[in-house]
Structure formats: structure tokens, C-alpha cells
Image: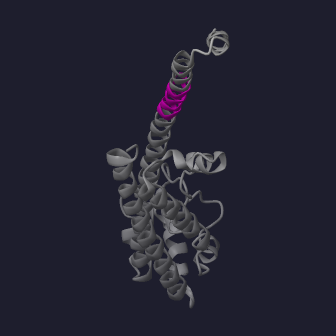
């Protein structure tokens, strides 16, 4: 329609009309591009909000698991200290199920890595730039790289405590579950722990394991602070 009018005006040499038609075409193209860009930007912001919410969910789960693991490794250090100091009876006192759980914690090593599926999706899809906050993008990169590195470096404890522990407790006793243990079973565990404690190398292995547990706990607290700061960025300015 516009093209036909332009041709008609051109044949009649109606230059003013031609100029008006040209302006109409240019303005129409410009408005169309602006509307298209506005729709694309709105879609990007909607997708950004989705990613922000999903990242926040992952970080909250990381914090929950970190708190759980800090509790485990603090128990690990406390029980190992009690064993090293000869307080076997205190370790086994009270609820057998709780005592068994605490003994099981002394063997724990390593920590689960961060939940990073959403972050990896952002990286893999090239959508990381959807997060407009540059400080947020940098903080996310630091958090996931440092936390992942920690899980790799501290996957193994430096000593041989676990071997000593499993060799000292009779293999037929389910130390991981003593809910219905009788007095005789508890006595056998106490005897095994006493034998473990008096081994020549036990004190060194316990010290090494306590150091390892303390190191892990300190790193977990650092990553918890990072995750908390990231949550603040996401909640306050992640989509700005």
C-alpha cells in the first residue's frame, strides 16, 4: 500500500508527499524495532527473575546442608577429644542410638559440594549475562569455584583414624545403629574403644582427625557466609 502510494507520488513528482511517506515508513520501522526490543527485554527480565529464584533456592539448600555438616564435624571433634582424653564412658553414656551416631560421625570425611545445577545451566546456555548485577555474577563465580575446590581438597582426611576405628570395634556390632543394643553389646564397644585409645598411634591419628575436622568446619563457615551474602544480593538487587 505504502509502496504503491510512493510510486504514484513519484510519477506525479509530488515531492512533499513522497517525503511524508518516507517519514511514515522510517517511523514505522523505528517503532516496530522499539516494540520488538521492549518485548525482548521484558522476556529477559522475566527469565532473570526465574533464575534468581532458582539460584536462591539452591543457596538456601546449601546453607541448610552446611549447618548440618558443621554440627557433624563439631561433634566429631568433641567425641575424638573425649576418646583421646580417656572419657570412653562419657562417650557411651546416655542414649545408645545417639552414642552410636556420634561415634559414626568420628569417621566422617569430606563434604557434599554446592548445589550448582542452575549456575551451570546459566554458564552452559550463555545466559549468565541475564543477571544484570555484575557484582552478583562475580560473587557467584567466586562462591562456586571456591566451594567446589574445598570439597576436592578436603575430600580425604590426612590420618588413619578410620582404619584404626573399624579395626577396634567388633565387626558384627552395627555401630551405625544401636537403638536396641543391650548392656553386653555396649560393654564390647567400650572395650573396643579402650583398646583403640591405648594403641601407640591413636593419639596422633586422633589429633590429625581433629585438625581435619576443625579445618573443614572453618571452611564451611566461610562458604556459609558467602552463601548468605549471595542471598542478600539476590533478594535485594539480583534483578536490578
Q: Residue at x 40, y 68 (%)?
A: 222
Left or right, 116 with reference to 137: right
Observer-nearest residue: 183 or 19? Answer: 19
Note whether 135 is above or below 202 in the view shown. above
Q: Residue at x 59, y 81 (%)?
A: 159
Looking at the image, which residue sits at the far front?
A: 13
Observer-nearest residue: 115 or 218? Answer: 115
Q: Residue at x 42, y 52 (%)?
A: 133
Q: Residue at x 50, y 30 (%)?
A: 34
Looking at the image, which residue sits at the far bottom?
A: 200
Note whether 120 is above or below 148 in the view shown. above
Measured from the top left, where is residue 116 in percent x and y?
Answer: 56, 51
Note whether 43 is above or below 236 in the view shown. above
Which segment is the magenta one?
28-43
Measured from the top left, where is residue 182 in percent x and y?
Answer: 49, 54
Magenta span includes 147: no
Observer-nearest residue: 127 or 95? Answer: 127
Amino acid at each position: 500500500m505504502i509502496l504503491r502510494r510512493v510510486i504514484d507520488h513519484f510519477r506525479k513528482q509530488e515531492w512533499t508527499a513522497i517525503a511524508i511517506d518516507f517519514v511514515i515508513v522510517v517511523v514505522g520501522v523505528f517503532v516496530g524495532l522499539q516494540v520488538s526490543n521492549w518485548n525482548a527485554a521484558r522476556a529477559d527480565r522475566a527469565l532473570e527473575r526465574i533464575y534468581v529464584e532458582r539460584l536462591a533456592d539452591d543457596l538456601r539448600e546449601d546453607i541448610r546442608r552446611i549447618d548440618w555438616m558443621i554440627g557433624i564435624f563439631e561433634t566429631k571433634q568433641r567425641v575424638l577429644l573425649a576418646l583421646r582424653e580417656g572419657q570412653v564412658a562419657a562417650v557411651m553414656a546416655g542414649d545408645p542410638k545417639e552414642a552410636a551416631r556420634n561415634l559414626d560421625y568420628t569417621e566422617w570425611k569430606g563434604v557434599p559440594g554446592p548445589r550448582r545445577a542452575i549456575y551451570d545451566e546459566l554458564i552452559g546456555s550463555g545466559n549468565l549475562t541475564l543477571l544484570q548485577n555484575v557484582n552478583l555474577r562475580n560473587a557467584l563465580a567466586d562462591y562456586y569455584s571456591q566451594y567446589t575446590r574445598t570439597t576436592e581438597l578436603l575430600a580425604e582426611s590426612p590420618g588413619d583414624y578410620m582404619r584404626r576405628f573399624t579395626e577396634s570395634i567388633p565387626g558384627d556390632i552395627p555401630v551405625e545403629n544401636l537403638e536396641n543394643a543391650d548392656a553386653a553389646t555396649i560393654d564390647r564397644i567400650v572395650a573396643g574403644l579402650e583398646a583403640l585409645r591405648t594403641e601407640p598411634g591413636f593419639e596422633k591419628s586422633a589429633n590429625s582427625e581433629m585438625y581435619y575436622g576443625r579445618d573443614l568446619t572453618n571452611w564451611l563457615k566461610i562458604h556459609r557466609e558467602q552463601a548468605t551474602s549471595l542471598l542478600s544480593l539476590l533478594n535485594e538487587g539480583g534483578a536490578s
